[in-house]
Image (tube, helix red, strand yellow):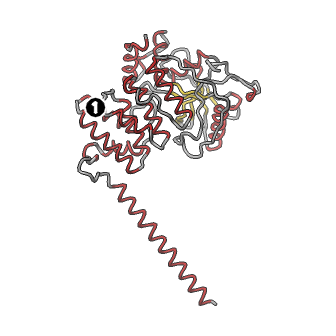
Amino acid sequence: MAELKTTDNKLSLWRVENEADIKDALVALAITRDKISDLAVVMIRPEDLQELSMDDEEGNSPTFGINDKHRNITNLNYDTLGTVIISILNGLRSGGYKKHSDRAIKRMIVEAYKAGKVDLSNAKESMREDIEKALQSNVMN
Amino acid sequence: MNEEIRWYGIVNALQYFSDAIRMLTESLSSENTAGNNTTETGNDINVLDHIPENIFESLTTEYYEPGMISLGQEYFEKLLKQGYREKIRRIITSLYQLAGRKRSHILEINTIMIISQLPYLGEWEDILAVAATRSPNLDVQEAGIRCFERWENKEACEFLRGRVFSEDWLQEYADEVCAEVLEGCDEVVLPEKDSITWEMATTGSNQSGDIERYSSGYRDGGAEDNGQQAFPLAGGK
């Protein structure tokens, strides 16, 4: 799973192998933002990324248990970006796309927090406020 | 013969010159219009008199990013904390009208997204959200639906109930929001699609509708995948 923002010609990915990993990765992606919001993800097959150079730099998400599953596609350039795009399209074609609503993301973050998987001290203040509101919300009960 | 060619050449040159002049004047004319962010009617406000230029610039040029607080949003949240509700209404409605006049989908989406993040007051915001759901631009329609999703207000969501969207993915989104808000459904299961058709996005990521969004979950490895499913199911069909 990837968030499509590059930094220093690197694109961040999370390697997921089961539903629990997917939820953890979603929380990891969502919780680094300013506010709880919807999140659309595309699943990319590892074989589609074989031509690309990757590293296994540990993630710095405030979510426990997922940071070792972080990977970077490195040395992105015009050519390799094309490979990334094709891999995303393959993911879309095979139905590996899902948009998670605000409410679904909120629920996942709250569940992760209650399970002790999230360290909010590293989250942005605006995100902490959103999570606190969600914890108090009747919807989550 | 040479004289004919020379005259023909001169006539063509004049034609190109007049075309160039026409294009240049049209370009200058549109720049002048773009620079005129004031409104003409007496009931509207001059938007730039009421918001900082950098905020206006951000609203008109920067695409909305889910989960990120934009400069515009920060600004209006600050106004709200200071109690300037009426001022917010006047600025937002003026911005929305300006977006319509300039046909600026970026401004339209950013304005609607700001409304979606403000607390629902039940005074004027739903009218703009409903208007957004009727925009010819699909991203704007989505932004309108998002307002009802974020407000989580049953009364407001009644505006969305029964609304018919031309794009399946928007209809599904609206149906999900209605189910969640009106019926309190936590998990919405939509009918599985029989086929997926794809159209390649040709320009940029904001050309919504060019890629059909299959929002029913992650697919199981099917015949199309040749059994090469790399990831176990995640609540997929």
On the image, which quarter does residue B234 sit in?
top right
On the image, which quarter does residue B113 sit in?
top left
The residue lying furthest to the front in this view is: B162
Q: Residue at x 52, y 33 (%)?
A: B170
Q: Which chain does tag 1 point to?
A: B
Q: Where is residue B13 in the image (x, y as percent from the top left)?
A: 53, 78
Residue type at numbered disc 1: Lys
Which corner quadrant holds the N terminus of chain A?
Answer: top right
Q: Nearer the viewer, residue B140 or B27?
A: B140
Q: Which of B189 and A84 is in front in this view?
A: B189
Q: In this view, does A109 lie above or below A71?
A: above
User: Mark 1: which secondary structure?
Assistant: helix
On the image, which quarter does residue A127 sit in?
top left
Q: Position of residue A2 (x, y in %)?
A: 57, 29
Which corner quadrant holds the C terminus of chain A?
Answer: top left
- From the image, tell me which residue sits under label 1: B78
Q: Where is residue B23 in the image (x, y as percent from the top left)?
A: 46, 66
Q: Which residue is drawn at 36% across and 32% down?
A: B126
Q: Residue at x 37, y 24 (%)?
A: B155
Q: Where is residue B211 in the image (x, y as percent from the top left)?
A: 59, 38
